[in-house]
Image (spheres, helix red, strand yellow):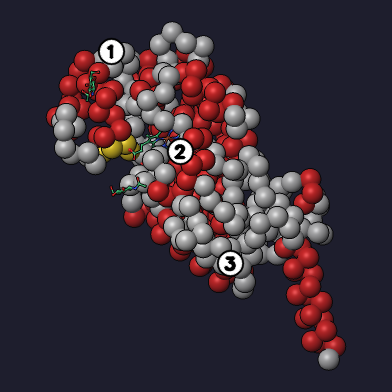
Amino acid sequence: MALSSLSFFRAFLLLSLATSAFSTRPYKEGLAPNFYDYVCPQALPTIKRIVEAAVQQERRMGASLLRLHFHDCFVNGCDASILLDPSPTIDSEKLAGPNNNSARGFEVIDQIKAEVDKACGFSLVSCADILAIAARDSVVALGGPSWEVQLGRRDSTTASRTTANNNIPAPNMDLPALINTFQKQGLDSRDLVALSGAHTIGFAQCRIFRDRIYNDTNIVADFARSLKSLCPRTGEDGNLAGLDPSPAQFDSLYFHNLLAQKGLLHSDQALYGGGSTDELVKTYSDDVEAFWDDFAKSMVKLGNIKPLIGNQGQIRLNCRRVN
Ligand code: HEM
Ligand SMILES: *[C@@H]1O[C@H](CO)[C@@H](O)[C@H](O)[C@H]1NC(C)=O
Ligand SMILES: *[C@@H]1O[C@H](CO)[C@@H](O)[C@H](O)[C@H]1NC(C)=O
């Protein structure tokens, strides 16, 4: 009897901690890095282990996981809305232009959720927090900076393909449109340049950079020519080119390349070539520490966009559907 009421109390305590009622920062004030420390100390190491294994198996997966968090946060906040599959009641963001046949890594997120729930003993960690932690662990796995991830986000019960189409920046945008897209999320032009540095890892498809290599004038000829063999005027839409010359290394070559008019996307080159962000691109190109510092700070800002907290939303049992 004493034992069972003790374990009842323990369970109650754990649940209270899970909703952050006893944590050092009440949930009403927002997110906190120690959100899972007392309730499930295995949560973060479990996520890191699976991200590392996935990246070891395929380096690109680190890039794909980082991008998922970005595309989640720009659509009604970081609430895992991007993970919801199409259903009669879900207007899936997976089908939005920027995501369809492009966003990837969903199976790794499923695997993390299953393992983390097993490690914690119940469904405790939100899918939105998993995306934020996986993004950080991916950057670290590819040799980039680390940062403390704010935690305590909850998961949405809705998704919006239209909002995804409207809010996620497009690769044909010029600098003013890019600045505007970020400004709508509370991010400034410094965040824009630092976060665009995410394109130091990963790949883009021919269909995405075709117009740039055939039509843009702010591209160096040799670079355009070498890409044209990979990406003809028609067909081969899915052929991949690295977003920078070292797509599995979180270095500053992305910025270095912009100085030489070798940005792969129109939106990349828009950050350098006569506009207000030139100086910052130059700084990052020869100071990887400055890039890393700002990138880490901007990732925290990105992750803090309109989280669901307290009793808003839910902790999904399966990241692909609402409970
Ligand atoms: C500034 C505006 C941005 C635009 C217009 C943009 C656009 C794109 C496009 C079109 C692709 C290639 C997709 C494909 O070919 O399937 C891509 C890839 C990628 N983006 Fe961005 N992006 C932007 C900012 C960001 C930010 C802020 C992040 C993360 C913090 C990010 C992370 C990535 C990564 C890591 C990849 C490679 C993904 C992979 O290989 O699977 N991007 N982006
Ligand atoms: C998504 O891509 C598939 C395959 O290319 C295509 O058939 C479908 O029409 C696209 N969906 C939307 C909503 O654009
Ligand atoms: C380039 O511009 C021309 C003229 O505006 C357009 O017809 C074409 O579709 C564009 N893209 C490519 C890949 O040539």
Mark 3 surroundings: few (<14), some (14-19) or many (≥20) residues within 10 A: few
Q: Which residue is mark 3?
A: 323
Ligand 2 under 8 Å from disc 3 Cβ: no
**Where does the C terminus fall, quadrant-wise?**
bottom right
Which type of secondary structure does the marked residue at label 2 adopt? helix
Mark 1 surroundings: few (<14), some (14-19) or many (≥20) residues within 10 A: few
- The answer to whether residue 279 is visible is no
Between the residue at mark 2 and the residue at mark 1, the CA separation in whole angstroms equals 27 Å
Determine the residue positioned at 51% across, 11% down: 276
| CB atoms of marks 1 and 3 within 8 Å | no
Q: Identity of the amino acid at label 2?
A: Asn
Query: Disc 2 vs disc 3: which is toward the camera?
Result: 2
Residue 217's disc number? 1
Mark 2 or 1, nearer chain start: 2
Between the residue at mark 1 and the residue at mark 3, the CA separation in whole angstroms equals 51 Å
Q: Is residue 59 left or right of residue 15?
A: left
Nearer-the-camera pick, 64 or 216 = 216
Q: Which residue is mark 2?
A: 165
Total residue callouts: 3
